[in-house]
Amino acid sequence: MKTKIPMMKQVLKLRKAKAYRKAYLDPEFLTRDELRPMRLQLELLKPEMTLAEYGVKSTVVVFGSARIWDKEQSEGRVAEMKKLLKKDPKDQVLRNKVASAERLGASAKYYEVARDFGRIVSTKDCIPGRKLVVVTGGGPGIMEAANRGAYEAGAKNIGLNITLDMEQGPNPYVSPEFCFRFHYFAIRKMHFVMRARALVAFPGGFGTMDELFEVLTLVQTGKKTRLPIVLVGKKYWDDVINFSNMAKWGYISKEDLKLFTYAETGEEIWQHIADFYREFPLANGK
């Protein structure tokens, strides 16, 4: 009996050893660099299998800045920063933030446009047998607005959140069963495009540009079936990107300028999508 006691302790010790953990239950093992291909596959499969189980086949993707808030939030943000600046009027960083917040306040109208569009697309149909589901990056700003519009219309909607250093978490309007979280931008962008039957891009920064040009390139090269691409806020897009000059220099063709159109309101965005599918009824994918 005396020899069995230390052996029992050894068995208990072995059961707690890292090597004894089942591979799929070992977080340290799963996060090793060598396991990256497996993690990529898991990030691809989880949303794909979940959306398939719920029968989600067609989406309308809404991109746009996380910095665009509604009017009340924008005014509150400016007031809060001015209050801080009053305590330290020589703080140049704060002065710059106040100026930036005031400029962004003029974009609050886009929040309402995205919210209205989320409601419209969730209550109307333009592709026979295909209900369009709103999908965004799941964060604040324009993403929140589009999810909010769908939520207020009583419709399920999707959020594809991404893990960042300044992680803000999902907005409260995303449907819980469709609230996904990604580590890899590449897989997240695949899920934006895979079921997309329309793309709507609001004013935004690097992230919005990255996502927009990804889709434009896929459609231009035939990797993605043509779909309606609507840029909201022509004044912004014309000021930031001169697409016509890209064609003038020969880096895109003039025909490529027909891959997208412009809109200013939720109804205009919806009309462009509806008109597209009246003209190209088979463009909704196989």
Image: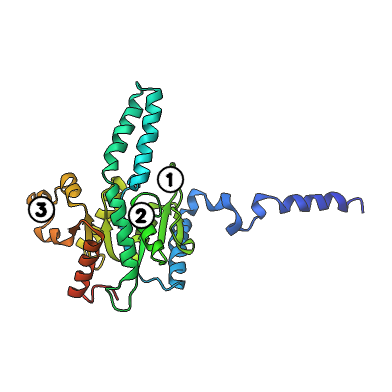
Q: Position of residue 191 (x, y in %)?
A: 37, 61
| Residue at x 8%, y 49% (from the top left corner) | 249
- Rounded to the nearest angstrom, the CA distance separating label 3 from label 1 is 35 Å
- Rounded to the nearest angstrom, the CA distance separating label 2 from label 3 is 33 Å
Q: Quadrant of the N terminus?
A: bottom right
The residue at which mark 2 appears reads as 145
Give the answer, above or below, for where 53 lies relative to 44.
below
Query: Residue flagged by tag 2: what amino acid is it?
Result: Ala
Q: Nearer the viewer, mark 2 or mark 3?
A: 2
Q: Quadrant of residue 189?
A: bottom left
Give the answer, above or below, for where 48 lies relative to 231.
below
The color scheme shown is rainbow
Query: Residue flagged by tag 1: what amino acid is it?
Result: Leu
N-terminal of the pair, mark 3 or mark 1, is: 1
Label 3 with label 1: CB-CB less than 8 Å: no
Crowd rating for badge 3 (residues with CA inside 10 Å; few <14, some 14–19, many 20+):
some
Crowd rating for badge 2 (residues with CA inside 10 Å; few <14, some 14–19, many 20+):
many
- Circle 2 — which element? helix
Q: Is residue 210 visible?
A: no
Q: Position of residue 163 (x, y in %)?
A: 44, 48
User: Which disc is residue 164 wearing?
Assistant: 1
Q: Nearer the viewer, residue 8 or 188?
A: 188
3 relative position to 21: left or right = right
Q: Nearer the viewer, mark 1 or mark 2?
A: 2
N-terminal of the pair, mark 1 or mark 2, is: 2
Q: Is residue 247 visible?
A: yes
The residue at which mark 3 appears reads as 247
- Circle 3 — which element? helix
Please count the marks in the image: 3
- Circle 1 — which element? loop
Query: Residue flagged by tag 3: what amino acid is it?
Result: Ala
